[in-house]
Image (cartoon, coloured by chain):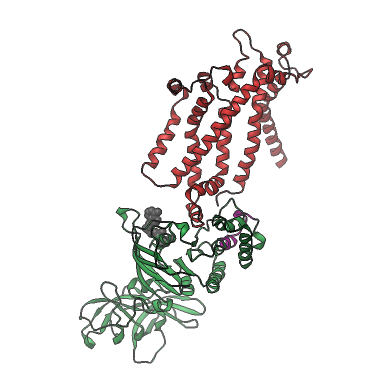
Chain colours: A red, B green
């Protein structure tokens, strides 16, 4: 009976895994085949395996530049969002001051606006400040769009850290600034890891703002680079797949690294 | 060691709610173990946090060793505090929890190591130094919290109900441990609790608080024997003191009171003569009420009816009803006393141990040094 239940569960899990991982495996296979091969048979195994497509994309299709741009913009944005967001969340959760809840509400309520509403005015703002078509401009926009959700997630976590912990650190001689770095942030690490993963994946794949705010080849990010293989009349499916695979690697790395921390923090019962 | 002096210390959190601590005046001497005792919400924690520097002081002055420290930040007061929740840093090992405060004070590395080892040894934490708080039992966490205070060797120790999260057996042993710690370190300690057994057994002196105000300060036994008002009388002691509404009669020059249907003559030192007819509260502790005949010139006998018997082994708590009195009247007698519910009984009161409180609830005793001794 128990083994039957187990088998059914296993079957369901297998089905789900195939459903979730199937397209990924397919794209991985496409990335190792040429577009001509793909047109002959969409689902054939790579034979021969065209490893050379990866260096080809990297060196000849400007992927090195796109990748580096994406790393610069996304890492900077995630770093700023995480630090500023954590500080804001700590402050809103910990300190009593006038308009605390009002600030929190105004910040959070911006989540309801779809990006299409703000993008035209943002475009104008960036042009006015000379930040249009620059990595700095895109970074700042990324910070702005991800900050509310980050603050929201972190605030609720910081608020659950017992106040005694901060009082104990004050008695131990630490200033508010030191307490944030040495007590609040480490204790909130599971939540911080969550927002890092979330923000990283979202921004790494971000297309809408990038396509509107960046037109110069030298400043393009990866999602824009992949789009370049889609021409007016034909698409280079093989190279798109190769580009996708290159783009996915950092996401997998980040996820593997931080989800470890995430699970560690949760099973350790961080707040106790 | 230090002298901590509170002079009319007041804390108002919220104007509409009145003061959480209201003109608290108290002087805690070198090496004294002062216990702040009172019911939940009476302002004990608030007072302690003002001393710690965790809460701003609305009014009054706080001084340590003669220096006013109202505006001195917590970190510069050289005070350590043990929290009710222990407040151990969850992301640090026991060792780092102990060393955290020393690191900030830029104590040399080797010295930190040595101090941590020594404190860990005295608290039997040696084998736990590498663990994180979540892997410790309640008692162990409690000891780490104690250790974190001890290792800093502060001028003043503050404790906020440190035993309330422990089970009964551990509470007793830790109580003994903290008392021993105080004897060994000889440091000034201020200890907040709502548990009167802790207060009675640990305190050099106790300070009873109610509604943000200090009711009485004194040695535990003194406060027990000479409560200044009905609150203290009813709060300290288990079972609580019998407090019965009474009226002064015109007999014995205004020194006899009518309790229910009985008239009792209160010894002179326990109350001055007062106006016949004025309302008072008559108080006597359960241990000064006997069920067997007593001799002695201050013994009075009244009749009652047993309504409940609680046999605790070593002693028996007998609740009785007196004619014309609403409240129960409690006697504490020997464990082998033979009483049954419903029977009529004779109660023998040791009137030399009675307390009279005026209409405002203040003690009418004329003995000196009531409030502070
Ligand atoms: N941070 C605070 N803000 C507002 N009121 C508070 C705060 N802390 C305590 N109080 C109020 O002050 C009073 C005394 O509280 P407290 O000192 O914690 O009592 P105790 O420790 O004796 O139980 C209570 O009425 C409580 O509600
Ligand atoms: Mg309290």
Q: Looking at the image, which is closer to me, A56 or B175?
A: A56
Report the front residue among B26 and B127: B26
Residue A178 x %, y %: 51, 48
Say above or below: B271 vs B233. Answer: below
Residue B132 shown in magenta = yes
Q: Is residue A1 visible?
A: no
Residue shown at the point (60%, 28%) measured from the top left = A71
* Residue B165 at least partly seen: yes
Viewer-proximal residue, B324 or B31? B31
Q: Quadrant of ligand 2?
A: bottom left
Classify residue B159 as left or right of residue A20.
left
Looking at the rendering, the stretch of residues picked out in magenta corresponds to B131-144
Q: Which quadrant of the view contains residue B208? A: bottom left
Classify the position of the C terminus of chain B by image quarter: bottom left
Q: Residue furthest top?
A: A233
- Tell me, yes or no, whether the highlighted magenta stretch contains residue B200: no
| Left or right, residue B192 beside residue B129 | left
A154, above or below B342, in the image:
above
Predominant SS of the magenta segment:
helix
Q: Position of residue B195 (x, y in %)?
A: 46, 68
Q: Position of residue B297 (x, y in %)?
A: 34, 92
Q: Residue at x 60, y 52 (%)?
A: B92
């Amino acid at each position: 009976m128990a083994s039957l239940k187990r088998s059914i569960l296993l079957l369901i899990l297998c089905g789900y895994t195939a459903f979730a991982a199937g397209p990924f495996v397919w794209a991985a296979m496409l990335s190792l085949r040429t577009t001509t091969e793909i047109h002959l048979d969409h689902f054939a195994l790579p034979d021969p395996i065209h490893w050379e497509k990866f260096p080809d994309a990297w060196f000849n299709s400007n992927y090195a530049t796109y990748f580096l741009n994406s790393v610069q913009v996304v890492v900077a944005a995630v770093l700023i969002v995480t630090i500023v967001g954590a500080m804001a969340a700590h402050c809103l959760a910990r300190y009593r001051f006038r308009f605390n809840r009002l600030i929190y509400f105004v910040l959070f309520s911006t989540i309801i606006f779809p990006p299409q509403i703000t993008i035209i005015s943002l475009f104008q703002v960036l042009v006015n400040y000379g930040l249009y078509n620059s990595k700095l401009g895109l970074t700042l926009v990324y910070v702005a769009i991800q900050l509310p959700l980050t603050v929201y997630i972190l605030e609720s976590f910081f608020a659950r850290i017992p106040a005694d912990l901060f009082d104990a650190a004050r008695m131990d001689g630490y200033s508010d600034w030191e307490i944030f770095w040495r007590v609040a942030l480490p204790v909130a690490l599971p939540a911080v890891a969550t927002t890092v993963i979330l923000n990283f994946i979202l921004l790494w794949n971000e297309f809408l703002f990038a396509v509107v705010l960046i037109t110069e080849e030298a400043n393009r990010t990866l999602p824009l680079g992949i789009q370049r293989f889609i021409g007016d009349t034909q698409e280079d499916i093989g190279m798109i797949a190769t580009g996708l695979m290159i783009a996915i690697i950092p996401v997998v790395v980040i996820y593997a690294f931080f989800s470890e921390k995430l699970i560690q923090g949760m099973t350790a019962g961080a707040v106790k | 060691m230090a002298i901590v002096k509170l002079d009319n210390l007041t804390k108002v959190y919220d104007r509409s709610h009145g003061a959480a601590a209201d003109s608290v005046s108290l002087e805690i001497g070198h090496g004294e173990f002062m216990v702040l005792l009172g019911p939940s919400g009476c302002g004990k924690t608030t007072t302690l946090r003002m001393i710690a520097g965790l809460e701003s002081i609305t009014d009054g002055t706080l001084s340590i060793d003669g220096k006013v420290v109202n505006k001195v930040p917590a970190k510069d007061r050289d005070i350590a505090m043990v929290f009710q929740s222990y407040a151990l840093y969850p992301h640090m090992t026991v060792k780092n929890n102990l060393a955290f405060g020393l690191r900030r004070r830029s104590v040399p590395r080797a010295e930190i190591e040595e101090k941590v080892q020594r404190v860990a040894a005295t608290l039997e934490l040696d084998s736990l130094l590498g663990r994180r708080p979540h892997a410790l039992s309640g008692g162990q966490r409690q000891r780490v919290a104690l250790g974190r205070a001890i290792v800093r060797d502060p001028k003043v120790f503050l404790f906020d109900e440190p035993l309330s999260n422990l089970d009964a057996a551990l509470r007793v042993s830790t109580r003994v441990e903290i008392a021993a710690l105080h004897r060994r370190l000889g440091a000034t300690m201020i200890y907040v609790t709502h548990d009167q057994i802790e207060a009675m057994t640990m305190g050099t002196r106790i300070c009873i608080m109610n509604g943000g105000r200090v009711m009485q300060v004194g040695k535990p036994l003194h406060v027990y024997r000479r409560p200044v008002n009905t609150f203290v009388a009813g709060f300290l002691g288990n079972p609580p003191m019998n407090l019965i509404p009474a009226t002064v009669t015109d007999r014995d020059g205004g020194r006899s009171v009518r309790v229910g249907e009985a008239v009792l003559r209160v010894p002179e030192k326990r109350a001055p003569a007062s106006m016949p007819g004025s309302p008072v509260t008559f108080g006597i502790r359960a241990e000064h009420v006997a069920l067997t005949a007593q001799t002695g010139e201050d013994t009075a006998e009244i009749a009652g009816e047993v309504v409940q018997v609680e046999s605790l082994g070593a002693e028996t708590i007998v609740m009785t009803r007196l004619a014309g009195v609403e409240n129960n009247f409690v006697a504490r007698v020997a464990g082998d006393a033979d009483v049954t519910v419903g029977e009529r009984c004779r109660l023998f009161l040791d009137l030399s141990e009675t307390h009279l409180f005026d209409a405002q609830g203040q003690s009418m005793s004329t003995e000196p040094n009531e409030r502070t001794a």
